[in-house]
Image (cartoon, grey):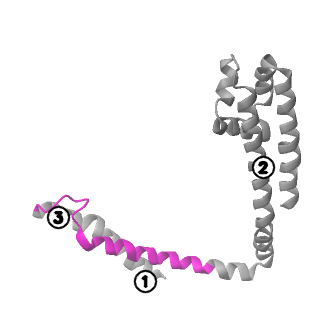
Amino acid sequence: WFVFDSIMVFMMVMETWVMTMALLVLGGPSASGGMGNASILRLLRLLRLSRMARMARLLRCMPELLILVKGMKAAMRSVFFTLLLLFFLLYIFGIAFVQITADSASDDVRRYFASVPKSMHALLLDGTMLDDLGGVVTILSQESFLLVGVFYFFVLLSALTVMNMLIGVL
C-alpha cells in the first residue's frame, strides 16, 4: 500500500501543481477546466477506497461488532414501520390542526398551523421531540382549550407511545 499511496501522491502533485503551472506558462485554457484528460487521474484516486475492504476483516476479528451490526439490520424493519406510524400520526393531526385553526385570528397560531407541512413540522418538533412544549401550549390555550386537549392527546400518542415503541425496538 505504501507504493500505491506514493504513486497517488505523486500523481496528485503532478496534476495540481506541475500541469497547472505548465498550462499557465504556455498560455493555454484556464487552469481549472483546461486539463482535458487529467480528470482520469482523479478517478484513479478513487482506488484508494478499496482500502476500506479492510473493515470486513475487522468485523471478523471482533464478533461483538458483528453482533451489533446484525442487530441493527434485524431492527430496520420494525424501526421503519414505527417511523411510518409516526408519520401517519403527524399527517392526521396536522390536517386536524389546520382545519381547527383555519379561522383563528391569532398570528402565533397561524405561524405554527398555517398549512399541513408547517403543522407537521410544528408537531414533530414541539409535540414529538418536546422542543418547546410550553410555548405551543401557551399559544394554543389563548385560542381554545380544545386545541390544548388535542395537542396533549397528540403528545401522548407520539412522544410517549410511538417513541417508546421505537426505543423498545432498538
| Total marks placed | 3
Q: What separation in Å lies between label 1 and label 3 (alpha carbons)?
A: 28 Å
Q: Are marks 1 and 2 in contact (CB under 8 Å)?
A: no
Q: Is residue 106 above or below residue 46?
A: above
Q: Which residues are magenta?
A: 27-54
Q: Earlier in the sequence, mark 1 or mark 3?
A: 1
Q: Which mark is residue 86?
A: 2
According to the picture, the residue beneath numbered tag 3 turns out to be: 23
Nearer the observer: mark 1 or 3; the answer is: 3
Q: Amino acid at mark 3?
A: Leu
User: How far across and how far down the image is residue 42, in percent?
Assistant: 36, 71
- The kind of residue on which mark 1 rests is Val
**Residue 16: percent from the left, percent from the top?**
30, 65
Q: Position of residue 27 (x, y in %)?
A: 11, 61
Q: Residue at x 43, y 83 (%)?
A: 3
Image position of 37 (left or right of 76): left
**Residue 25 magenta-drawn?**
no
Q: Quadrant of residue 14?
A: bottom left
- Please tell me whether the stretch drawn in magenta is mainly helix, strand or loop: helix
Residue appearing at x 67%, y 82% in the figure: 57
Q: Circle 1 — which element? A: helix
Disc on the earlier residue, 2 or 3: 3
Quarter of the image for residue 145 reads top right
**Residue position for label 1:** 3
Q: Secondary structure at mark 2?
A: helix
Give the class, few, some or many, for how many residues have Cα within 10 Å of label 2's Cα (few <14, many ≥20).
many
